[in-house]
Image: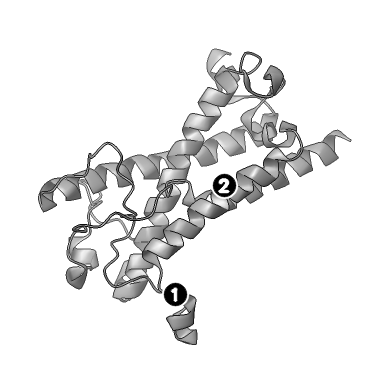
Amino acid sequence: HKTTLYNTNMMKLAVISALAGSAAAFAPAQTGARSTSLNSFSADDLPGALAPMGFFDPLGFAEKADEATLKRYREAEVTHGRVAMLAVIGFLVGEAVEGSSFLFDASISGPAISHPGQVPGGWDALIIAGIGFAELQRAKTGWVDPADVKFDQAGALNSDYYPGDIGFDPLGLKPEDSEELDVMITKELQNGRLAMLAAAGFLAQEAVDGKGILEHFSS
């Protein structure tokens, strides 16, 4: 029974994680200037490269990619990074407030990977619907309408869309200066990359021994 419950929890977590690629896209794009010029979108001028590693691409994906493919690579990287940053926070906060949260009568407890399976029935559908709506807004902002795309160009991004620039900036933090913007993009990418490693480590560790991350820190 425990094995079945564990597998169910992991399946729910996998579904939510897969759909959460839109977690950073809670609003349609605002009008106004975009980031760096898309006409010069190439590996040579992409933000995100820092010493001592520089532009780290040991398998040569960027070298083999055309501009459209490179844009999709960067869109995937920045979106996964944003989801991973939210996931890391969710791991730590979710385990820190277990037993004391006002949600679900404080009944959810244990390692964070087991939390999705403890959510009462019906809430799963609401969560998935919310994520799906956010994903739709991101797609409408960045992607060419499938009806207007050739069969061999599936997933094409709009020509005026800069990867990750979905227009969600409620605090007005986006710099107007292009150099300052590249610095901010690099910071986001680096934090997202670290978060992806951290989230993967959290998942693996909890799956191995069934203990929460905070429990590991305190033991």
Looking at the rendered image, the quarter that the C terminus falls into is top right
Crowd tier of the residue under label 1, counting other residues whose Cα lies within 10 Å: few below 14, some 14–19, many 20 or above? some
Quarter of the image for residue 194 reads top left
Amino acid type at image mark 2: Gly
Q: Is residue 97 visible?
A: yes
Query: Is 156 rendered above or below residue 11?
Result: below
Give the x, y percent position of residue 143. Answer: 41, 68
Amino acid type at image mark 1: Asp
Query: Is 46 rendered above or below residue 125?
Result: below
Q: Residues under labels 2 and 1: Cα distance?
A: 21 Å
The secondary element bearing badge 1 is classed as loop
Query: Is 140 rendered above or below residue 171?
Result: below
Looking at the rendered image, the quarter that the N terminus falls into is top right
Dot label at residue 130:
2
Quarter of the image for residue 116 reads top right
The secondary element bearing badge 2 is classed as helix
Q: Which residue is mark 1?
A: 145
**Front-most of residues 2 and 161:** 161
Give the x, y percent position of residue 162. Answer: 28, 61
